[in-house]
Amino acid sequence: MLQYLLTFVVLGQPATPPAAGADKPAAEQSQPAEKAAAGDKKPEAAGNPCDKNAPRPANKPKKTLPPVGPRTDIGAGTYWMPVANSDMAEHVDGLFLAILAISIFCFVGITIAVVYFAWKYRHREGHQAPESDAHNDALEITWTIIPSIVCVIIFLLGWKGFVDLNTPPKHAYEITVVAEKWKWSYKYPNGWVDENLHVPVGEPVRLVMRSKDVLHSFWVPSFRVKQDVIPNRYTKIWFEAKTPGVYRQYCAEYCGDRHSFMKSLVVVHPPGGFKRYMEEAEQALLDMPPVELGEYLYAARGCNQCHSTDGTTKTGPSWKGIFGETHQTSAGAVKVDENYIRESILDPTAKVRAGFNPVMPTFKGQLKDEQIDGLITYIKCLK
Ligand code: CUA
């Protein structure tokens, strides 16, 4: 019980919380603010593609992401470091324990010697301090050389760990990590964006990390990996998880008043489970109503970096109310319809709207047809 209470106090959460993400659909996890805003509008007529609260057919319930399950790294009954779950962690622990053992040996040895000599050579009536040598070459050389060798060994082992930590295997699976006040996002090669880090067991994973605002630090205690995440620069880290389970991930750099809430989970999937999760997650996206999918992709795929939905002009034109309008483009006047939006996503420089630069990257091969449908519907609904 005491362990449970302490865990609660230290971590701010009970040792066995409900499965994260099990109770919320994917879209709500990603965009609570926008969803709340959309909820204020009055309900629209049935059959309206813009109505995100339209009743869904019984055979097509709203898909939610697979639950991530209870955490496995806490509640194990230890005040020591969490279970080491990577080769790197074992190297770090080995070195840490060796330094700890040497420190305890020196502390105990020196304390015993000090107490013993203080007692043995205490002042007594009639005793005279004998003459002693100014120095002792053999002793001094010994206590210089042995600690120096120990320090060099510690340095070499630490250096090896540092180099290993910064040299991912060539075939490592790469995930993009984006830090911002105060959340982590994980982007996968297939375009899926998750609020938790999902990785396969027994495979090296390389994280390429950047920050949208201030200095953060990516930390997974169970893997013993920690790396600053910095704006305007990429930092990298890699690890290979040894045991499936759910582990804590923290921000380890004070980044504002909600710094301590900036945390996520690392879900290490058993063999085959990672691929399945990715497919299920992608399917959950495809099963969303098109307008919801479009709204999700607008934020998840970074359209929001250049296009506003409120009429503000950024690097690209705002999406608000453009559907049906006629625009001057580099290829003459064009009516904004489904085909023009689709072309602009797949071949953005074909017809660039007047007053804007041809800077948009192509999304050819990166978005499925259903996802493009979703974006078109979302733009249609922005009135
Ligand atoms: Cu981000 Cu602390």
Image (cartoon, rainbow, N blue to C red):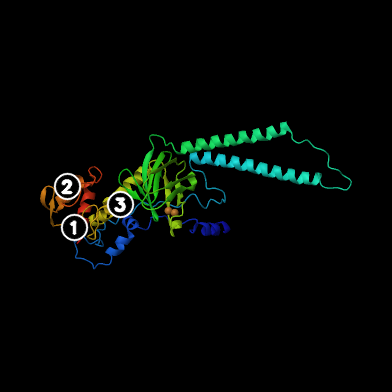
In three-dimensional space, the C-alpha distance between marks 1 and 3, rounded to whole angstroms, equals: 19 Å
Horizontal side of 68 relative to 346 (left or right) equals right
Query: What residue do we see at 54% from left, 48% from top?
Result: 81
> Is residue 254 or residue 183 the one in the foreground?
254
Helix, strand or loop at mark 2? helix
What's the amino acid at mark 2? Glu
The residue beneath circle 1 is 380
Query: What residue do we see at 71% from left, 45% from top?
Result: 111
Horizontal side of 366 relative to 229 (left or right) equals left
Helix, strand or loop at mark 1? helix
Q: Quadrant of ligand 1?
A: bottom left
Q: As displayed, is residue 91 above or below residue 301?
A: above
Horizontal side of 290 relative to 241 (left or right) equals left
* Quadrant that contains the C terminus: bottom left
Circle 1 crowding by C-alpha within 10 Å: few under 14, some 14–19, many from 20: many
What's the amino acid at mark 1? Lys
Q: Is residue 287 visible?
A: no
* Quadrant that contains the N terminus: bottom right
In three-dimensional space, the C-alpha distance between marks 2 and 1, rounded to whole angstroms, equals: 15 Å
Res 49 → quadrant? bottom left
Q: Which mark is residue 28?
A: none
Looking at the image, tell me whether mark 3 or mark 2 is earlier in sequence order.
3
The residue beneath circle 3 is 300
What's the amino acid at mark 3? Ala
Q: Position of residue 76 (x, y in %)?
A: 53, 50
Q: Position of residue 258 (x, y in %)?
A: 43, 59
Res 293 → quadrant? bottom left
Looking at the image, tell me whether mark 1 or mark 3 is earlier in sequence order.
3
Looking at the image, tell me whether mark 2 or mark 1 is earlier in sequence order.
2
Q: Which mark is residue 343?
A: 2
Query: What residue do we see at 30% from left, 51% from top?
Result: 300
